[in-house]
Image (spheres, rainbow, N blue to C red):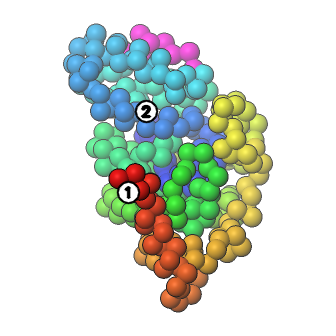
Amino acid sequence: MTPTFLFGFERSGTTLLTMMVGAHPHLSCPLSVTGTWWAFADRLEEFGGLRTPDDIRRMVDAVADHERLKLWKVDFDREALAAQIRPGEYGDLVHAFHTAAAEAEGKAAWVNMDIVTLFRFEDVARLFPAARFVQIVRDGRDVALSFKGYRFGGLNALEVADRWSRATVAADRIGHALGPDRYLRIRYEDLVGLPEQTLDRLCDFTGQAYDPAMLDYAGDVSRKVPDATRDLWPILDRPPQTDKIGRWTREMKSSERYVIEEAAGEALDRFGYERSGAGFSAGGELRGAWCYLTRGARLRRLTKR
């Protein structure tokens, strides 16, 4: 089976997309392990580079015991997993765990969702030379709004705009270099506003037929999403909410919008998001200066000095 990797910037609809894809009768898409695969990849030498059967078994045990993998609620047959992994082939390990999860669901193909793929795109593409990739992109101004009140956020408007534009554009460039057979970009706004058409395009890209069950994902939310993090997606068990599109036009202060459009204007253009059209803003420049001073808690560090 050819794996598919979904990814996107935080607060861009990645969890919603996970639920939709995972509701397909033939596609397994477990809850994101949020960088766990690549954290283990960086620790390969601790496990002897998977050179021997003992190295492989040790890493299989470590992965199976990891808290993120336990959220998949799969009773992994560790010996069977280890038997599928060739010496030195870390990609086999990732494939074996995902395949086991797919088989536990009675599904034929696996899909990985991980926002960290956004920053490790080249590494993943090398590890899986035949894999497909789907990046979901959301308007950076709405992403910035979604970060407000997000307990894993803490970024100001300039920081969000800078990170969003750099990461999404870099991944899009890599994706286009891979070609249309291996890379697909979709927009959050289309997923929410035109879900059937957008999911049909995604399914066609992965070699599957669209199934209406993909929009009947609400029943899986309580099974897949832990209670401890359920508050991060309070409306995940509802149909796609179109009022989440273009929130910035209704809720964002003009000075904040100015900061984001100045910092991420080219990225907004690249992904088809119209700018507000406002010209120079003194208030926007002041907010931008304040964001610069306070980004990464810089001002707090300077005052301590």
Magenta residues (range): 74-83
Q: Give the residue type at disc 1.
A: Leu
Callout 2 crowding tier (Cα within 10 Å): few <14, some 14–19, many ≥20: some
x 40%, y 30%: residue: 94
The answer to whether residue 216 is seen in the rendering is no
Q: Quadrant of residue 175?
A: bottom left
x 34%, y 43%: residue: 124
Q: Is residue 160 magenta?
A: no
Q: Nearer the viewer, residue 202 or 229?
A: 229
Q: Nearer the viewer, residue 284 or 70?
A: 284
Counting from the top left corner in percent of width and height, residue 3 is at 44, 40
What predominant SS class does the magenta segment belong to?
helix
Location of mark 2 (residue): 36
Position of residue 285 relative to residue 301, above or below, is below
Comparing marks 2 and 1, which lies closer to the viewer? Answer: 1
Q: Give the residue type at disc 2.
A: Thr
x 40%, y 17%: residue: 62
Q: Residue furthest bottom?
A: 279
Counting from the top left corner in percent of width and height, residue 117 is at 41, 46
Counting from the top left corner in percent of width and height, residue 191 is at 63, 59
In this rendering, position of residue 279 left or right of residue 118: right
Location of mark 1 (residue): 302
